[in-house]
Image (spheres, rainbow, N blue to C red):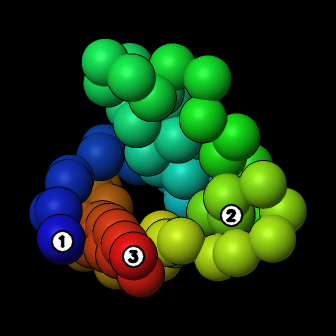
Amino acid sequence: MTLLVTIPVSSSLGQRIAFVQHLMSLAVVEAVRTLPGYEDIELNLKWPNDIYYSNLMKVGGVLVNSTLMGNMFHILIGMKCLV
């Protein structure tokens, strides 16, 4: 899945654009844990962008590419599940 997001440079997140990849990786793990039956699944992050099951198997990852155009960051966020 790929998501396009635009963020103003002057915003709080725009001033810390490098954190977008970390935030998205955390969001994916937390989203899985909200699913019924998966609340206690042992998903972990291997910084900055790999998602592991029980530190044994990589199950996904998040990649972020940002481009500055004028006063806006155009960010492509790619999320991939390997399982």
Quote the CA–CA distance across marks 2 and 3.
11 Å
Q: Which of 29 and 76 is in front in this view?
A: 29
* Callouts 2 and 3 close, C-beta under 8 Å: no
Horizontal and vertical percent for residue 69?
Answer: 25, 73
Q: Is residue 24 above or below residue 58?
A: above
* Callouts 3 and 1 close, C-beta under 8 Å: no
Residue sitting at x 38%, y 32%: 31
Position of the C terminus, as image quadrant, is: bottom left
Secondary structure at numbered mark 1: strand
Please tell me how crowded label 3 is: few (under 14), some (14-19), or many (20+) other residues with Cα within 10 Å: few
Quote the CA–CA distance across marks 3 and 1.
17 Å
Q: Which amino acid does label 3 sit on?
A: Val
Q: Name the residue under label 1.
A: 2
Identify the mark nearer the N-term, 2 or 3. 2
Horizontal and vertical percent for residue 59?
Answer: 53, 71
Quote the CA–CA distance across marks 2 and 1.
20 Å
Q: Quadrant of residue 81?
A: bottom left
* Callouts 2 and 1 close, C-beta under 8 Å: no
Position of the N terminus, as image quadrant, is: bottom left
